[in-house]
């Protein structure tokens, strides 16, 4: 039950970030609902389709209701949520940290390889946001210098490695999610980045 509630909260957090993008562009309610839903369930949808398992929100429509409730709330209070810029980014960071592990764990349960599990973790945590930014015509998080996708990769990879080292799933998940949160939190608070590619032809 606790994991289910946390799953709903994660979808809600991602849906809020999608709805905020729509509110900034002063779109109508249907467009806001579209962005909230796309961001909230996009990563998990891609994961389930690639894994060949039933899509989670088709089996449980509560996820769609969560996106609807978030959209209605934002229609009236988006201007208030906008003032919580850094807390909202931290909430998104928590969602990324949890979902990179949950995505990897779901891939492992259906018997996929380590590399596939890591990729599914990254996709679950980030694909909704990438879709949101692409459709909205905003710079995608994947091309920004600050650590974002890398944090999801570290979390998903860490979970898989710890699991194969024999640690209990709960401990592996907690440690891996904490690693992702620290990396993403460092990017939010201190502007952490990874070294970028440098053209060596003129060096």
Image (cartoon, rainbow, N blue to C red):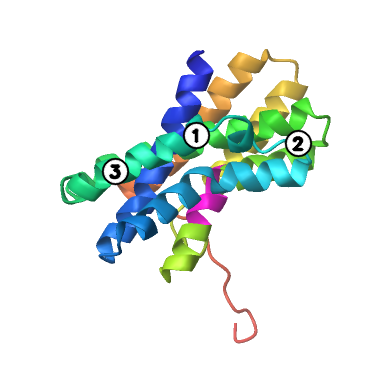
Q: Name the residue under label 3.
A: 72
> What is the magenta segment's predominant secondary structure?
helix
Quadrant holding the C terminus: bottom right
Earlier sequence position, callout 2 versus callout 3:
2
Residue name at image x 55 percent, y 23 percent: 175
As measured in the structure, the alpha-carbon distance from the residue carrying label 3 to the one carrying label 1 is: 15 Å
Direction from residue 135 to residue 26 in the image, left or right: left
Direction from residue 112 to residue 47 in the image, left or right: left
Q: Mark 1 points at which residue?
A: 63
Secondary element at tag 3: helix
Question: What is the span of residues highlighted in magenta in the rendered image?
Answer: 125-130
Residue name at image x 65 percent, y 48 percent: 46
When asked about the image quadrant of residue 95, the answer is: top left
Q: Mark 2 points at which residue?
A: 53
Magenta stretch holds residue 129 = yes
As measured in the structure, the alpha-carbon distance from the residue carrying label 2 to the one carrying label 3 is: 30 Å
């Amino acid at each position: 039950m606790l994991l289910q509630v946390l799953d709903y909260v994660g979808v809600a957090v991602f849906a809020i970030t999608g709805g905020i993008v729509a509110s900034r562009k002063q779109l109508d309610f249907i467009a806001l609902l579209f962005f909230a839903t796309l961001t909230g369930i996009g990563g998990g949808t891609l994961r389930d389709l690639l894994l060949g398992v039933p899509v989670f929100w088709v089996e449980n429509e509560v996820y769609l209701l969560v996106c609807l409730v978030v959209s209605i709330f934002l229609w009236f209070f988006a201007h208030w949520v906008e003032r919580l810029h850094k807390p909202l980014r931290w909430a998104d960071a928590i969602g990324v940290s949890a979902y990179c592990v949950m995505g990897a764990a779901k891939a492992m349960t259906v018997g996929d390889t380590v590399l596939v599990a890591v990729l599914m973790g990254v996709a679950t945590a980030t694909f909704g946001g990438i879709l949101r930014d692409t459709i909205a015509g905003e710079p995608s998080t994947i091309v920004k210098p600050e650590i974002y996708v890398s944090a999801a990769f570290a979390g998903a990879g860490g979970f898989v490695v710890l699991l194969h080292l024999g640690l209990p799933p709960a401990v592996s998940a907690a440690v891996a999610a904490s690693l992702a949160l620290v990396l993403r939190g460092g990017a939010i608070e201190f502007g952490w980045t990874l070294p970028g590619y440098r053209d060596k032809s003129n060096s």
